[in-house]
């Protein structure tokens, strides 16, 4: 079992930066690949970024590539999402997710555990 708690979301101006954190509890964090997803009002939850168990492999949605960076600290049981050059279209609730496997994945159904989400709002 893995419990996930996101933090760091807030209102920011376009062009600004935010760092989201996801604190995990449970002994399987270091063996789990992790991902970030987001859901805007009226839209489906979509993939943002993923990172492998060791952090050696990362994968990004085209919409955030070059602007967002996912990382993890297994000693702290935490995964991060650094978001730069934010745009109004990045406004969404951001969710952290864990999967019981070492490799990155981009489909919602490949993830087994989800956090409650943190709201990010980007003003123009």
Image (cartoon, rainbow, N blue to C red):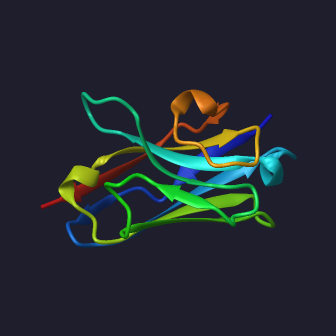
Q: Is residue 37 left or right of residue 104?
A: left
Task: Looking at the picture, tell me which residue is in the foreground, 55 or 86.
Answer: 55
Q: Is residue 114 left or right of residue 93?
A: right
Tally the marks.
0
Residue appearing at x 70%, y 48% in the figure: 103
Q: Residue furthest right?
A: 27
| Left or right of residue 111, residue 42 in this image | left
Point 46% across, 43% down: residue = 37
Give residue 71's position: percent from left, percent from top: 60, 66
User: Picture coordinates of residue 63 (x, y %)?
Assistant: 31, 54
Figure quadrant of the N terminus: top right
Residue 64: image location, x then y, percent: 35, 59
Between 45 and 102, the one lying in front of the other is 102
Determine whether 101 is above or below 30 in the image.
above
Compared to residue 55, the image places residue 50 above or below, namely: above
Relative to 36, is 124 on the left or the right? left
Location of residue 10 by image quarter: bottom left
Q: Position of residue 114 (x, y in %)?
A: 60, 35
- The C terminus lies in which quarter of the figure? bottom left
Q: Residue at x 19, y 55 (%)?
A: 88
Q: Nearer the viewer, residue 57 or 19?
A: 57
The image quarter containing residue 110 is top right
| Residue shown at the point (52%, 56%) measured from the top left | 59
């Amino acid at each position: 079992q893995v419990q996930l708690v996101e933090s760091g979301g807030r209102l920011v101006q376009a062009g600004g930066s935010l760092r989201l954190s996801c604190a995990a509890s449970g002994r399987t964090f270091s063996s789990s690949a992790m991902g970030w997803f987001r859901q805007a009002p009226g839209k489906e939850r979509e993939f943002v970024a993923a990172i492998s168990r060791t952090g050696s492999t990362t994968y990004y949605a085209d919409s955030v590539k070059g602007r967002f960076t996912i990382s993890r600290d297994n000693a702290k049981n935490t995964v991060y999402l650094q978001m730069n050059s934010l745009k109004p279209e990045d406004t969404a609730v951001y969710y952290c997710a864990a999967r019981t496997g070492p490799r990155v994945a981009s489909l919602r159904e490949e993830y087994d555990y989800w956090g409650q989400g943190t709201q990010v709002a980007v003003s123009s």
